[in-house]
Amino acid sequence: MKLLEGKNAIITGGSRGIGKGIAEVFAKQGANVAFTYNSSADAANVLAEELSKLGVKAKAYQSNAASFKEADQLVKDVAEDFGSIDILVNNAGITKDNLLMRMSEEDFDKVIEVNLKSIFNMTKAVQRTMLKQRKGSIINMSSVVGVSGNAGQANYAASKAGIIGFSKSMAQELGSRNIRTNVVAPGFIETEMTAKLDEKVVDGWRQAIPLKRGGSPEDIANTCVFLGSDLSAYITGQVLHVDGGMNT
């Protein structure tokens, strides 16, 4: 029995990195997957084809989650194409790191808009469908940085901490309709982005983690499978740290 058999999921920022990992594992667990991409149309279409081969419905949508109008239209399109929306994974995010003394207003605003306002846009858009269904699981991607902060990432940390507060509020607002809202807080996850970094630096980070390794997109995806499935039917308003023990 596949844990997400027949469920329909939207994953924002699904064409690469952690989002791609979630899309792949969801499809393997039987979910039909609608995922968004920003610019990489070719990679998105290749992924949609790969997922379809697993026997599920998969479709890529170009959509900017930071745009209220685009988020609203996306949810309408997915509801029409897929029939229902059971799971929303808000994964789209960016970084523009700098010490506060060097951080521009634009770099602060952009990170808040893409990382935090997108959660508002997508949740507001999807709640209509989920309220009618009287069920749904919303999974918001925060970060260990949103819990403990990090020098040089004030904008990113603020956006990721904001996601936690927003999600706990949604758990209280939407719980009576059987709509659950939870947060995943990844630690150091190794993706194509981290592969470009100096190996010695990366290994230093690994050694500082109790499990002595970086996480994989699959580690995050497996947690999202749990939160999207009926196994977590009585869990809402929680922050799951998937960080190898970084934040203990």
Image (cartoon, rainbow, N blue to C red):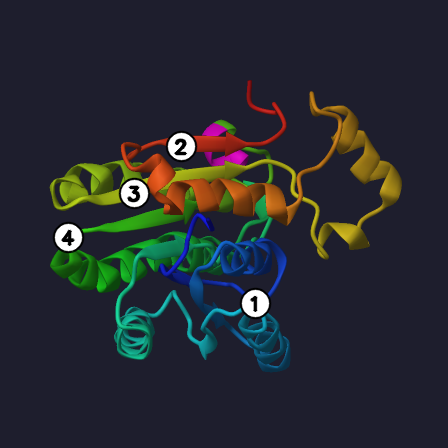
Q: Earlier in the sequence, mark 1 or mark 4?
A: 1
Q: Could you tell me the amino acid type at mark 3?
A: Thr
Q: Could you tell me the amino acid type at mark 1?
A: Leu
Q: Earlier in the sequence, mark 2 or mark 1?
A: 1
Q: Are marks 1 and 4 in contact (CB under 8 Å)?
A: no
Q: Nearer the viewer, residue 116 or 210?
A: 210
Q: Residues within 10 Å of mark 1 (few under 14, many from 20)?
A: some
Q: Kindly state the secondary structure of the residue where label 3 is placed.
A: strand
Q: In the rendered view, does 34 fall on the left or right side of 102?
A: left
**What range is drawn magenta here?**
142-147
Q: CA distance from mark 4 to mark 2?
A: 23 Å
- 12 above or below 181? below
Magenta part mainly helix, strand or loop? helix
Check disc 2 and report the residue beneath it: 239
Q: Quadrant of residue 176?
A: top left
- 164 above or below 177? above
Q: CA distance from mark 1 to mark 3?
A: 28 Å
- 198 above or below 185? below
Check disc 1 and report the residue beneath it: 54
Q: Position of residue 136 (x, y in %)?
A: 26, 51
Q: Residue sitting at 29 percent across and 37 percent down?
A: 233
Q: Residues within 10 Å of mark 2 (few under 14, many from 20)?
A: many
Q: Could you tell me the amino acid type at mark 4?
A: Arg
Q: Residue furthest front?
A: 1
Q: Earlier in the sequence, mark 1 or mark 3?
A: 1
Q: Nearer the viewer, mark 4 or mark 2?
A: 4
Check disc 3 and report the residue beneath it: 181
Q: Residue sitting at 19 percent across and 63 percent down?
A: 129
Q: Kindly state the secondary structure of the residue where label 2 is placed.
A: strand
Q: CA distance from mark 2 to mark 1?
A: 30 Å
Check disc 4 and report the residue beneath it: 134
Q: CA distance from mark 1 to mark 4?
A: 29 Å
